[in-house]
Each structure stands twice: as C-alpha cells, then as structure tokens.
Image: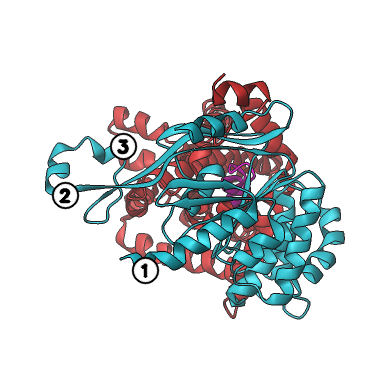
Amino acid sequence: MAATTKKTKSNMDDTRDPIVVIDGVDIIYRVFSSGKLANRTNIGNKKMERKLKIREVHAVKNVSFTVYRGETVGIIGTNGSGKSSLLRAIAGLTQVQNGAIYAAARPVLLGVGAVLLPNLSGEKNIILGGLAMGFSKSAMHENTASITEFAGLEDFIDLPMRTYSSGMSARLRFAIATSRNHDILIIDEALSVGDQQFRKRSEARMREMREKAGTVFLVSHSLDSILDTCSRVIWLEKGVLMMDGDPKEVCAAYNDYTSVKPAAK
Amino acid sequence: MTLAEYAQKHGLKRVGARSPFIEYIKDSWDRRVFAATLASYNNEAADARNRLGRWWVVLLPTIQAATYGLIFGVILGAHARPANFIAYLFSGVFLFNFMNGCFQGGSNSITGNAGLIKSLSFPRVLLPISAVIRELLNFWPPLVLMVLAMLFTREWPTWSWLLVPVVILLMAFFSMGLGMIAARLNAQFRDLGKLIPFMTRIIFYVSGVFFALDKVLGSQPVIFAIFKFNPFYDFIQLTRSLMMQEFAPTLELWLQCAGWAVVMPIIGFIYFWKAEERYGRDD
C-alpha cells in the first residue's frame, strides 16, 4: 500500500492552491429491483424491502484526489465506470454516500441533453442564461452577438431551441456557459456531439480559461481530445481510481487495458 | 492532517451546501431581472404556439366567466345569489384564477425547468417568483373585463376603486409564498402533482367565488367563521367590498389580507430555501 500513502501526500500540497478536494467519496445508488428508486421515505419500509429486493449499485468507490488551480483534468474510463456520477457529485447534483467534496467556488456542469428553455429562441436563451449567471441585461445585449458567433449559430439564433440538433444545442450551451469565467467548469461529454471545427474552437477556449486560472474537468471518450487539452488525467474503472497523473502515461495505460481485456477473457 | 482539514485550511466549502440565508436573499435580489425576463419570454413563447396568440389572455377568462355564469346562474337557486350576480361572479372567477395560476405556476416551476436548473446555477427561488410575475403580466385583460362587468351592472366608480391595485399587490405577495411552498412540495413529492387539481377544485368551491357565503352559511356561525379565514375568500371579498355597493370593506378584512401578504411569502421563502441544494438532484 505504498502507493496509497504517496497519493494522500500529493493530495495535500500546501505550496499549491487547491480548488477541489475529493475526500474518500462513495456514491451508491439504491434501486429496488422493480426500478423504483429507494429513498428516505421507502427505505425503512420492511414489507417493501422484502417484496422488492434492493439492488445496490456502487458507482464510485472511495475516491480521493485534489485538483489545483489552473489544472485541466481529463477523466477517462469505460462506460459505466462512474465518471458521470463523480462529476455530478462534484457539481452537487448527486448525493455522496460517504466522504465529502470541497470546492473553492460553485462548480458549473455542462452535460449532454439538457436544453435550457426549449420553446424560446436561441437568442433569448443566451440572454436568460447570462442573466441567471449574474450579467446585466445591457451586458447581455452586447454579448449576444459574440456568443452566437462562437457557437456558429448566426443563421438559426431566432429559432426555438427545441428545433436545434443535439450538436447545435451543445454548442450554444457551451458558448453561454463559457461567456463568463468560471472557477470550476465541468464538461461531461457535452462537446462530443460538436463537429471538428467546433472542437478546435472549444479546446482553445478551455485553454484560455485555464490561463485565467480556471479549472476544467473534462469527460470524453476521445483520447485525442483529452491529450490535446488536459494537464492531468484520472482513470476510473468500475468506480475505483486506477491511475492519476500525466496524460500521456495514463492514456497509454488505459489504451493497453482496453485493448487487452477482450483477449484475456 | 486529514483532507477535510486541508480543505478547510485553504478556504474550500463543502459542495452542495446551500448558501446562508442573507446571502441567498441578496443573490436573489441581484438577479431579479432574470425572473422578470423569464416571465415575459415565457409568455411570448406560449403565445407563439397557438394561432390566436395574445388574444387567449382575454378570450379564456371571458369564456370561463360565461360558462360559470351559465352553470351556476341556472343550477344554483336565487337564494344563494348575491344581488349583483354578474359582477360577483366575474370578480370571483378572475381573482381566484390569478391566485390559482400562481399556485399552479409555482408548483411546476422546479419540475418544469429541469434543463435550466441542471445547466445553470442561480437562486432557484427566482423560478416560482417568475411564475407570479407571469401571472401579473397576464392579469390586465381579466382586470379590464372585471371593471367592465362592474360598469355594465351599474356599479359606478368610487374613490375606493383606487385601492384595488393595493389589494392586487397584497394578493401577489400572498400568491408568491403559496407558489414557493407548492414548488418545493411538488419537486420533492411528485405524487402531489396528481392531487393539485382536486385541491384547487375544493378551494374554488369554498372561496365564495359564485355564491354568497353569508346566504348559504348564515345559519351556521362556526363554519362561516372558518370559511372567512380562507385567504382566497378574503382577497376576493376585499376587492368586491371596494368596488360593489353591496359590500363594505371592514378593518378585519384588511388586516387579514395584509397578514396573509406578509406571513405567507416569509414562510414560503424559508421553506423553499431550506431545500435549495436538493432541487435538480437525481435522487
């Protein structure tokens, strides 16, 4: 267990400025086998527990790490390895079972699928999004053009957001969210639906954010994208932290793992 | 040193903990433009989807009042009817609709805006507040219709009509508190959403919208007293007493309405804030 002690030591570096501290986090989903989510109201119900077996899904197992100011952290792992669960917990959207997550500012999560207000035009979504983030209305009227341009949606900005393709809506959400500097931005595959051109632009913006001392978490299945943008990579497998360190090393190890596994079985 | 101590030493805060009460109020106030803009945009979007658009704001209350007039004017015997039934009915239906709209809008404000909540962080209380602003923006056509119904039935304007906006403001504050409570309840216990239609029905029938409470319950003073405590009845009756000769505003009514308008938003705000970190969570 020499590795563990070494890990905890690097988790508490007083010479650097920590932004997010993940302290022994467990995330467990309790689901009745019928699919009904177990919660406080029905978990003590013995009759129900006997009738419908509770399945425990241990999505994240005792994960600890510290992220410092200015880092861009890539998180990789196969499907169902707990990446999204961990990121949602960092954003405060999923409860942790054990341990705790500490952050210097409120993290902002960009996920796939979420549409802001589907019946409103892209332009109005930009204005509302900005107002919700604390911009003034006049500032938003000024910013709208540059956000639209960044998202590459000049021709569609007056259409309701429900008519957008998944790529278009992801681009717009990224453009809105990054129009303001966030201390902590979490991107959960939100960019995977964007095209090549947008990928380049968004990677540039993430680097920009990092230079302004923001911290970015990025989940992606594109190792190229991770290698291009991240300064550090964390590899999760079945909820366990497998490796944490230099992007090239971790990605290489992950590549070996995914290519060897089918043959071993 | 544990990780928790290390985090504390560097001033990190636990994720998901709600912000302190005063800070929360300040954050909400700073973003009040968001609530107002969201309300007006939502109105525009709702109008754009049907052909008559904005006209529905006028048409719907008219049709509604006509329907209730037909049903209750015919079914209900004259003994339960106040002298000026048309003005009584119009004011009852429109004012009830306003409060009911805030309640419904509030109860949907968290569950119906999941995309917004999951993508952006802002004080969630702005959503039920926005629902009330939306109702206020839509309230002028029914208000005009109500005044027309008064004039049509020979209730001539008096100085006390000028106090009606004050009552509407009090009513908006009361409804805001109601909306905040409904928002949290519906977000935490989705099953309640199924019961809301029945609740509003019951309130509709006990608030003296279409029959005169004193004529029906006059012989049972205890039940009458309980009914008079109902805030929906209080606001409707106070407005009527200011506009119709039949009724006179009492100090008791004013105090009750003012009380509801102060107490309800405070309770609602605190109740809503207590669960702030849980809105938008999956579990």
Q: Magenta stretch: give its range.
A: B121-135
Residue A13 vertical position relative to residue A251 in the rendered view, above or below: above
Main structural element of the magenta stretch: helix, strand or loop?
Answer: helix
Horizontal and vertical percent for residue B51? Answer: 59, 81
Among the two numbered marks 2 and 3 on one chain, the one whose residue lies closer to the N terminus: 3
Q: Are marks 2 and 3 in contact (CB under 8 Å)?
A: no
The residue that disc 1 covers is A262
Residue A158 visible in rendering: no
Residue depicted at 34% across the width and 65% down the height: A264
Q: Chain of mark 1?
A: A
Q: Where on the picture, by quarter, is residue B254? A: top right
| Nearest-to-viewer mark from 2 and 1 | 1
| Nearest-to-viewer mark from 3 and 1 | 1
Question: SS at mark 2?
Answer: loop
Horizontal and vertical percent for residue A154? Answer: 78, 77
Per the rendering, the mark at residue A40 is 3
Residue depicted at 40% across the width and 43% down the height: B188
Of all chains in the rendering, the one displayed in red is B
Among the two numbered marks 3 and 1 on one chain, the one whose residue lies closer to the N terminus: 3
